[in-house]
Image (cartoon, rainbow, N blue to C red):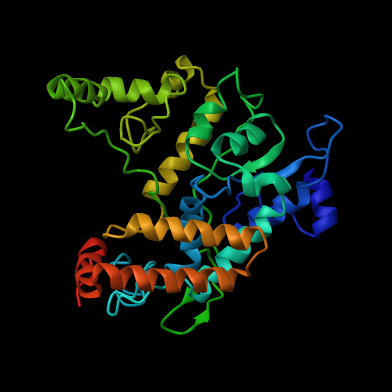
Amino acid sequence: WQAEFRREMGHDMPVKMETWEDVLEIAQFFHGKDWNGDGDPDNGITLHLKVGGQGFFHFMALSAPYVVIPYPGEPKTKVTKYHNVYWFDPETMEPLINSPGHVRALEMLLKLSKAGSPAMWGWSLGEAWADFLSGNAVFCFSWGDVGSLSQDPTQSVIKGKLGARGIPGTKHPYDMQKGRFLDLDKPNMVGNQVGCSWHPVISKYAKDPDLCYYFIAWQSTPEINHWNVYMGWTGVDPGTTYDWFPPYGTAKVEEYVAGGYDAEDAKYFIGAYQDNFYNYPIFQNYMRIPGTPEMHEIWDVHLSEAITGQLTPQEALDRTYEDWKRIVEDYGKDTLLKLYRESIGYKP
């Protein structure tokens, strides 16, 4: 396939996939070809784009390198009006969600969606994962659960064939201070922690809260937590030093193999996590202010309107901008501005 890619595209396949542009090119190349030999045309990529199907979280990650750029001095993580910001202008609380960087990223998502099944706009996690695990899609852009599920012989035919990498970047991020897209020699890489804030809660109506807490604490011990990561398909993904391989942690490939992993698959899977957490210069921050659920929900709807062709990417994000402005006003602009600044570490 690499020789055919070279003939068709005029250059070598960018197998490192350091940018979303690389991913798109490979997905477009493979889409519609019978690359798995089953007699049917196959997909370049599989995505879960259904409203309510968590797809907006993934646009968050995809769009970050188009929007978030590092501080030009030290430290690279310093937050200014123009650097290491994604959601709002930290001086005015004006939404940034329809910035040129966000729009270009949504244009990229739209192109990616056309390199897969036309049914993807209605897919939730299960359908998107199944397309990949059945060997029908080259790429799956999703949560880390896919890495462990790929090892489950009852769901997957790709064990021993898994590759993985951290979130790609782009060489063309938007610089809000200069008001233009940059043309970089190396990709702008923005690490991602979307999904890393899952935690157990105890209902105030629990009859035995102490017993609930004991169970939670037991699940959180290093021995049990690590077992949940490497042994089976629990939905508990890698996230601690005892899940990582040296030099970042203390885990061993043999532990994952004992849990049912192919050794090389485990190296790719855990390696992608390690790269994301340790080798990216900056990270995208979460939105942690009142009104976040409402903003996420309306954003999800407008993203779907763009993916399904009801609106252009610019129109969809312009509508998101207007809705977010209204939500900010409803909650109190001054109150949210103070909380937003605190949440991202911005000091006026």
Question: Toward the viewer: 328 or 248?
Answer: 328
Which x, y percent locates residue 9?
80, 58
Which x, y percent locates residue 339?
21, 65
Q: Residue 94, located in which quarter of the rendered image?
A: bottom left
Image vertical order of residue 220 relative to residue 280, above or below: above
Image vertical order of residue 43 relative to residue 38, above or below: below
Question: Toward the viewer: 73 or 19?
Answer: 19
Q: Is 139 on the left-hand or right-hand side of 203?
A: right
Kindly tell me whether residue 316 is visible in this rendering: yes
Question: Toward the viewer: 231 or 216?
Answer: 216
For image coordinates 48% across by 18% down, the residue present is 257
The single residue placed furthest to the left in the displayed view is: 210
Q: Quadrant of the C terminus?
A: bottom left
Q: Residue 172, located in which quarter of the rendered image?
A: bottom right
Image vertical order of residue 236 relative to residue 211, above or below: below
Which x, y percent locates residue 22?
65, 57
Which x, y percent locates residue 259?
45, 17
Kindly tell me whether residue 69 is visible in this rendering: no
Q: Is 223 on the left-hand or right-hand side of 106?
A: left
Image vertical order of residue 34 relative to residue 332, above or below: above
For image coordinates 53% across by 65% down, the residue present is 186
For image coordinates 80% across by 51% down, the residue present is 5
Q: Quadrant of the N terminus?
A: top right
Q: Residue 207, located in which quarter of the rendered image?
A: top left
Q: Is 87 on the left-hand or right-hand side of 15?
A: left
